[in-house]
Image: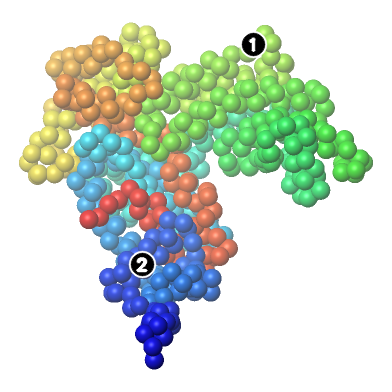
Amino acid sequence: MTTTENRKMSTLDGFVRPAKCSEARAKNISDRVTNMIVQDLRPIRTVECDGFRNLMKYLEPGYVLPSRKQFTADINLKHATYKNHLKGKLREEAVFISLTTDLWTSIATESYITVTAHYIDNNWVLQAFVLETLPFPERHTGINIAQKLKEMVGEWEILDTVRMVSHDQGSNMKAAMEILHNELNWQNLHCTAHCLQLCILAGFKINSIDRLLAAAKKIVTHFHHSVVASEALKQKQIEMNMPGKKLINSCVTRWNSTYEMLDRLLKLRWPVTAVLSDSKVTKPSNRYLDLKSEQWKLVEELVEVLENFSTATTFLSYEENVSMSAAFPILHGIIDQLVPDVSDSGVIKQFKEIVSSEISERFELNSLHAAHPMLLTAIIDPRFKNLTLGRYTESEQDSLKKGIVELMEMYKVYEEHEHGSQTSHEPSPSDVKRPKRLTALDKLLGEEAAVAEPSLSSELEKYLTEPPPPRRDNPLVWWQLNAGRFKVVSYVARRLLCIPATTTSSERVFSTGLTVTKLRSNLKPKNVYALIFLNQNLSKLSIH
């Protein structure tokens, strides 16, 4: 055999007999496949699909793809590893933790409860993690929900650091929070976005608006169900030099969806009208779908009003934002915008009056007590302190300041506990002897507050006289730079500014519908938990 023939045979052997994949490389590939399943929310059965197996065989011929069972085990092992890592992180960094929680049902009609944790770490960075997504087959009573939350917090060993729970306005959730407040002294807040949604829905009950929304949904449904109409709408947009967009349908449980539906419909008014009036596309029986001119005018007015709500809920729902401190100024800003204008139609004036009244009533803006977290958080945010206090009389301001000082009084107890036990966690009030002056906990329990120490009041006053930073600035950056100057006030800031204004973090877990899909409807609950935990937390946690 010639040299040339030997060379050809050697080259051919390289294709026929794939190079061996080292054990280390095989492990790295398998780990990346596991991460792909987690991060892209792919079904675990993907590893058994012919297309994927053929792709891996082409890319790495010497790699033997593990079984579906092995990848499931790897996911659960990774989950256990990262969960332990997060437990340690919470012990080291979280002095105060605020939770959000929500209940949901999967496509497989299995009930789950999700809990997220929010805190400010030692570097004044807001952290947010999904702690648990567990099956909840029991009846969703207040007692059962409270018990489940206590079990979760006990499992994570954060009982002494949880101070607040944000939740929806379900009667069972309210009952659970009352139990937890009585037993563990946890405070609780309703989701700001949920409350705003209920306020808007009250305005939507006005007859003319209710009829308009029903008519708008019929138009959207018609285009979604008719391929001919949908294609004609695309063509009309091209003819009118408009960017191709689809109509959006509203969903009663999704924030801002009615605004999005009306806004998109208004933007596509002329293409929609053109299609509905085209006898070649629309049957005579469907010509009635187009809105009347006065209805289009009402759409225009509603979109202008609802835009403020969309902006507010979007901002308050960002997980990375310090959000609760902005809730009070934003709510008052919305009410200011809802003052009827002379150019408003009678319907819009009525809508504004109803929604404004609902906001004041549901958020109790005219009767908030001095210890309400919404108020205290706004004052402890350097951007909004003057704006918030400026809405109250001098005597009311004194009461609000006392609310802050009473939280400041806990600092000495916290500092003594920290130095005595070498832990950064604030002690539970039951674990320490109460000082003679009463603490914030005493106020929550209904006891009268004592007169604050002058030194604490003077530090608070010094903070309040500081010029506020620009509204767009991150208040945590300000506190990182000024915590040394306002040692005790910063303790309160770290306690309050981690509170989220909405339950978006826990709702985001299931609202996308990507974790338990039709392709994953047979997922066992423990695998659902592992996948959600890793999908939501993997990029935030680094294990070296």
State the quadrant of the C terminus: bottom left
Front one among 27 and 405: 27
Depicted 362 relative to depicted 90: above or below: above
* Residue 441 x/y as whole percent: 25, 32
Can residue 180 be seen in the rendering of this structure?
no
State the quadrant of the N terminus: bottom left
Residue 29's mark?
2
Depicted 237 relative to depicted 38: above or below: above
Image position of 359 (left or right of 39): right
In the picture as drawn, the residue positioned furthest to the left comes out as 420
Q: Amino acid at mark 2?
A: Ile
Measuring 88% from the left and 38% from the top, which residue is drawn there?
278
Measuring 44% from the left and 53% from the top, which residue is drawn there?
113
Depicted 292 relative to depicted 24: above or below: above
* Residue 59 x/y as whole percent: 43, 69
Q: Residues within 10 Å of mark 1 (few under 14, many from 20)?
A: few
Q: In the picture, residue 401 is in which quadrant?
A: top left
Depicted 427 relative to depicted 209: above or below: below
Image position of 100 (left or right of 93): right
Residue 341's mark?
1
